[in-house]
Amino acid sequence: MDAVRVALLREVLAGTEWIQDTRRFAGSLRAAVGSHGGGLLLVGSATYEPWHLAAHLDDEAAWSGLPELSPTLVRHRVPGGAPTHLGVGLGRLAAAGRGETLLVVAPGQPGAGLLERVHDARRNGATVLALDSGDRDLHALAHDALTALPAPPGGAGGTSHDLDNDNSDLDHDLSPEVGHELDLDTVQHLVSAAAGENNLPAPRRNRRFLDRLARLADELIAGPPPYW
């Protein structure tokens, strides 16, 4: 999807919450990769590989002058002979840690194996973001999440066959009606386009972190400073 089609889509969606929500989520993505500088990992589910989002984020990274938006696509199955940039398997998530950002895209249930790896990455300090269809377990692990309808069969997410053997642009025709829910592929287009823009809204902050910060401030005001 090119910039003109994204602009037309935004006109169709004007007055809905999708424009604000996708830009907010893109702001969280920008903030995470921009402040931590540890790289962006992009992973899908066992049945859905978000290679099209990877390509769009790579384009946005080049056009916006933000190389940190260019992701490393992490794959559940790496076929023999895959080029280096498409040969990163799930073992990469075991090494994910502080400073890195993990973006999980899952149109259905992510699966216990992926959730376990995401949990380990978060425990090791990685920032976790999720684009999905509302999985409760994945949302519990994510620092920020955006929910959409599952991607349609044969949508822009692609398969490992598409990724390894087909360089064509398979964008589908998108013409949602105002007020209708958007599918995951459409939301990915809006998020990737917004990620390369300037003046994005501030990301949603972790409420528990703010609460802890407020309690710490109260303790410092109420009593003498602690000994270190």
Image (cartoon, helix red, strand yellow):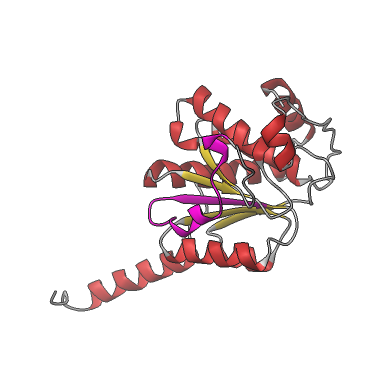
Give the answer, above or below, for where 168 lies relative to 200.
Answer: above
Would you say 131 lies left or right of 120 here? right
| Image location (x, y in percent) of residue 20 | 64, 43
Give the answer, above or below, for where 145 lies relative to 62.
Answer: below
Please tell me which residue is depicted at 56% across the width and 60% down the height of the picture.
142
Q: Where, by quadrant of the figure, is residue 55 drawn? A: top right
| Image location (x, y in percent) of residue 228 | 14, 74
Q: Is residue 71 visible?
A: yes
Viewer-proximal residue among 41 and 131: 41
Quadrant location, the N terminus: top right
Q: Where, by quadrant of the figure, is residue 26 drawn? A: top right
Q: Where, by quadrant of the figure, is residue 108 drawn? A: bottom right
Q: Is residue 201 visible?
A: no
| Image location (x, y in percent) of residue 115 | 60, 65
Pick out the residue farthest to the left: 227
Pick out the residue farthest to the front: 80
* 52 magenta-colored: no
| Image location (x, y in percent) of residue 127 | 47, 55
Viewer-proximal residue among 165 and 138: 165
Would you say 9 lies left or right of 38 here? right
Viewer-proximal residue among 15 and 74: 74
Please tell me which residue is depicted at 74% across the width and 42% down the height of the picture.
159
Please tell me which residue is depicted at 57% across the width and 38% down the height of the picture.
86
Q: How many marks?
A: 0
Please tell me which residue is depicted at 51% across the width and 56% down the height of the picture.
91
* 100 magenta-colored: yes
Residue range in magenta is 83-105
Would you say 37 lies left or right of 82 here? left
